[in-house]
Amino acid sequence: MGVLYLIRHGQASFGSDDYDVLSALGHTQSSAIGQGWEAAEFQPTDAIAGSMRRHAETAIAAIDACGGPDGYDVDAGWNEYDHIGIATAHDESALTLDTKAFQVVLNQALAQWREGIGEFEEPYAAFEKRVLTAFERAVDVAGPGRQVAVFSSGGPIAMAVSHVLVGDDSLFRRLNDVLVNASITTILCGTSGPRLLTFNEHTHLPRDLVTYR
C-alpha cells in the first residue's frame, strides 16, 4: 500500500501585489510541516508540487525542514482555480474586502462558476477534469511502500477528496471552505482504490499559526 499526503500551501499574501507568494507566517507554517515530519522520524519518498510559486515555496520549506526527499516533480494539474478572477468577475470590489467578506463573495462566485454562469478561461468542468487527472497520476506514483507528498491548494485537494468520498464533486465547496493553510490530508492507495484516512490534519501547527486564507 502507498500513501498520498495532500498538503495545502502555507498562507499566501492576500491583499498584496502578488498573492502567489508566501507570507512570513506562510513560511513558518510550511517549515512546521517538515519539523513535524522530522519529529516523527518520517520523510516522504517522493514529492510533487503544482507549478504556482506558493506551492514551490511550501514544498521547499517542508522538505528542507525534514531533510528529504531530494527535490520534487512539478505537475501543473495541481494548480488552484483562478479565485481572484472568479471573485472579481462576480464583484469588482472583491479585492478591497477583508478576508471574511472576500470569502463570502468568493463562495457566491464559485456557485455561479460551477453552474456554468459567466465566461472564464478555465470552466469549472475543465478544472475538475484537470485535478482528477493529476490525482490519478499521483495515485500511480503512490505504489506499494511509497509515501508521496503533494503540495497544492485548497481547491484541488477539496475536489480530489470529494471524489474519493462520494464519487463526484458534491462536497467540493464544503470541504474547500474549511481547509487550513499547511494542513495535511492523507489518502491510502491500495488494491481497493484511494481511500481517505485523515482530512485537514494540522496538529503540527500551534494555534497561533492556524489560518484559512
Image (cartoon, rainbow, N blue to C red):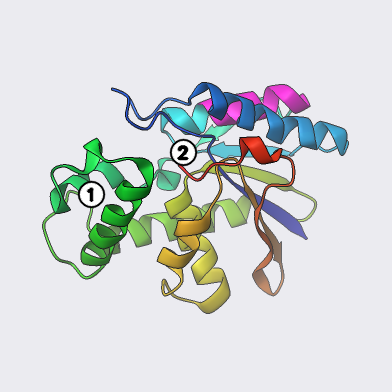
**CA neighbours of label 1 inside 10 A, class few (<14), some (14 to 19), many (20+):** many
Residue assigned mark 1: 87
Query: Taking 107 as reference, is 60 above or below it?
Result: above
Bounds of the magenta span?
57-67
Report whether residue 40 is seen: yes
Give coordinates of residue 135: x percent, y percent: 51, 56
SS class of the residue under badge 2? loop
Q: Is residue 41 left or right of residue 51?
A: right
Determine the residue positioned at 60% across, 57% down.
139
Q: Who is closer to the viewer here, 136 or 170?
A: 170
The quadrant holding residue 113 is: bottom left
Q: Is residue 58 magenta?
A: yes
How many angstroms separate mark 2 from mark 1 (CA)?
A: 22 Å
SS class of the residue under badge 1? helix
Instruction: Return the mark for residue 50.
Output: 2
Query: Taking 166 as reference, is 104 above or below it?
Result: above
Query: Taking 62 as reference, is 99 above or below it?
Result: below
Q: Quadrant of the N terminus?
A: bottom right
**CA neighbours of label 2 inside 10 A, class few (<14), some (14 to 19), many (20+):** many
Instruction: Return the mark for residue 66.
Output: none
